[in-house]
């Protein structure tokens, strides 16, 4: 059973109240998504590629909403 604090990898909901922690987490989400997207492309897995693209976009959106930088 999932906890209320868990979010899907492609969620753009902020995960940290601290803006620096949020920025770091969103950057990690973007990196993970970009890697997943590239690997999906390399192995011709369209589902993985799409998941990575969504995750990367969600991280970018979280960064736009954050005021750390």
Image (cartoon, rainbow, N blue to C red):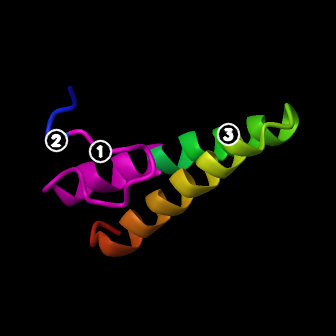
Q: Are marks 1 and 2 in contact (CB under 8 Å)?
A: yes
Q: Helix or strand or loop: what does disc 1 sit on? A: loop
Residue at left offset 54%, top offset 62%: 57
Above or below 33: residue 64: below
Residue at left offset 60%, top offset 47%: 51
In this view, the residue in front, 12 or 20, is 12
Residue 7 circle label = 1
Q: Helix or strand or loop: what does disc 2 sit on? A: loop
Q: Helix or strand or loop: what does disc 3 sit on? A: helix
- For residue 45, side relative to residue 48 (left or right): right
Q: Is residue 8 magenta?
A: yes
Q: CA distance from mark 3 to mark 2?
A: 24 Å
| Residue located beneath label 3 in the image | 48
Q: Which residues are magenta?
A: 6-28
Residue 5 circle label = 2
Residue 7: x and y, percent? 29, 44
Residue 55: x and y, percent? 52, 51
């Amino acid at each position: 059973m999932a906890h209320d604090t868990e979010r899907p990898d492609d969620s753009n909901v902020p995960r940290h109240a601290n803006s620096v922690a949020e920025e770091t987490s969103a950057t990690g989400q973007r990196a993970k998504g970009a890697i997943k997207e590239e690997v999906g492309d390399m192995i011709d897995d369209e589902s993985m590629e799409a998941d990575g693209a969504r995750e990367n976009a969600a991280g970018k959106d979280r960064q736009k909403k954050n005021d750390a930088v």
